[in-house]
Amino acid sequence: MRFVSKSANLMLVLKQGFPGNHLTGTAPVSGVYIKFQNGVVDVKEQSLIDLMLRHPGFNTDYIVVEEEKADPFDYLRNQTEPSHVLTEIKYGHVEKSVGNKNPIKLSPEIKNMLHEEAVRMAKEMLPSMMKEVLKEMTNGTNPTSTKEEVSDGKEEGTLIDLEKEEIAFEKEIKEPFCPECSSKGVRHLKDCPKFK
């Protein structure tokens, strides 16, 4: 069973321990203690669960939460360690302070409200965005494709024309630099019979 507490390091005394006495011959009695870690403890033994349910702090200091449900006190609980701030000092002057900022914790109600507002805004923005995308697709200017204007008298190039140009450009790159020799690039000036 999962128990959740408001405080991060709650320590429960379920059964008080007593020290032994040599004079009377009584044996020591060990106590039963449970410590919450980060405000949560999972108890598996049924005897301990019964003791925790009968404890006077039940439903005031800690509560039972089902395994699937979120921690209801997560936004209220303080961190176990304080945030550390390091100050760098050079030549007796403070240069800069470095530290970890405390994260802003929002209640579940505010998180739900923000989520609903974001969904509402997305629904309002979606029709106008879809209209713009459809208008661009019908005009032939799709922002995702690599269409460019062709300078041979056509206003806009189609995808097929662009693919043909890309294939021709790739062929030009693969063909030799000079038709008289098969050299490319820097070696052309040294090896070409045209320049000898």
Image (spheres, helix red, strand yellow):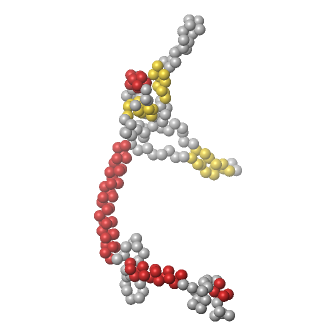
Q: Quadrant of the N terminus?
A: top left
Residue 159 x/y as whole percent = 38, 78
Q: Quadrant of the C terminus?
A: bottom right
Residue 5 x/y as whole percent = 43, 32
Q: Nearer the viewer, residue 43 or 126?
A: 43
* Residue at 32%, 57% in the rendered image: 121
Asked whether residue 149 is in view, the answer is: no
4 is higher (above) or lower (below) than 171: above
**Horizontally, is 100 left or right of 108 in the view?**
right
The single residue placed furthest to the top in the displayed view is 24
Total numbered labels placed on residues in the image: 0
Residue 42 x/y as whole percent = 44, 32
* Residue at 41%, 88% in the rendered image: 152
Asked whether residue 161 is in view, the answer is: yes
162 is higher (above) or lower (below) than 45: below
* Residue at 45%, 32% in the rendered image: 41
**Horizontally, is 99 left or right of 104 in the view?**
right
Q: Quadrant of residue 176?
A: bottom right
147 is higher (above) or lower (below) than 49: below
Residue 11 x/y as whole percent = 48, 27
**Horizontally, is 58 left or right of 120 in the view?**
right
* Residue at 54%, 39% in the rendered image: 82
Q: Quadrant of residue 182?
A: bottom right
